[in-house]
Amino acid sequence: MASSNSSLNLSFSTRVLLLLLFLGCFRPSSSAALPTHTNDRWRRPCARDSSVTVVDDTGEVIDNFAGLSRMSIGLKQMVNSLKNDYVNARFGDESQAEEERVNSGLVITGSPSWTASSDNMTETLLVCYENLARLAVITRLTREAEETAPGNRDFATRFQRIEDHTESGLYVLMCNLHTVMSSMGIETMSPEAEAEVASITFDEGLSNAIRHVRDYIVILVQEDSVDKLGSTFDRLARQLASQTTPSTAQ
């Protein structure tokens, strides 16, 4: 009988302990955790949250834009290198790659959309940031398709380098632009824009030949986007500089 009571007591104690552990583990957190899945990196491009000081000094803002332009140049060099190697390996030469692109009729849905230049700095930066987010998503999707494709996967690491390069990668550029915009009091993306970017997907089950054409188109989109980013940041720096330079007119 004593043995039976002891067994019952132990069972009851175990249940209480498990209940306490359950309540402790699932207690609501007072602050939202940052997303860790790679699919969410474009939402939080910086590795960690940090306080941002609002910048009032025009010279510092000009320097920030010049720094973003330099990063864009570094990213462009990586994209150009990837394009040359990818075309040579997959198509033989650029004329063949272009012929297959045209014949395929493929379009990358959700690609960056570059509007005409605007004198409104806030509007311009919002376009840059949203297009960087779009570029980050289609680059990730391209890398993942390369990683899971049968046969040759030589270019998965090259796409990842474009994402993660410590000085000029997509997420470093996004993080720096995010910081610059925050320091100017500019919200980076609206909920509507985030929803559009989050909905970008790629078709699965493509043949290698079609996938290679799609990858090539993505590289062309990268090339065009980093060109426009660099020229935009240069233009913004010049625009600010001209507004702060004293007039010499008499």
Image: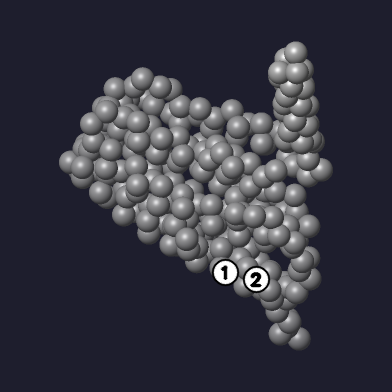
In the image, taking residue 27 as reference, residue 179 lies left or right, namely left
Give the amino acid at mark 1. Ala
- Mark 2 is surrounded, within 10 Å at the Cα level, by few (under 14), some (14 to 19) or many (20 or more) other residues, namely some
Q: Residue at x 37, y 25 (%)?
A: 105
Whether pointer 2 and pointer 1 mark residues with C-beta atoms closer than 8 Å, the reply is: yes
Identify the residue at the far front of this view. Answer: 1
What residue sits right under mark 2 in the picture? 62
What residue sits right under mark 1 in the picture? 66
Q: Position of residue 28 (x, y in %)?
A: 79, 36
Q: Which image quarter holds the C terminus? A: bottom right
Q: Position of residue 178 (x, y in %)?
A: 65, 55
Residue 121 makes an appearance in the image: no
Q: Residue at x 66, y 31 (%)?
A: 195
- Mark 1 is surrounded, within 10 Å at the Cα level, by few (under 14), some (14 to 19) or many (20 or more) other residues, namely some
Q: Residue at x 74, y 63 (%)?
A: 52
50 w.r.t. 24: above or below:
below
Give the amino acid at mark 2. Ile
Residue 229 makes an appearance in the image: yes
Q: Position of residue 109 (x, y in %)?
A: 50, 29
Q: Distance between the residues labelled 2 and 1?
A: 6 Å
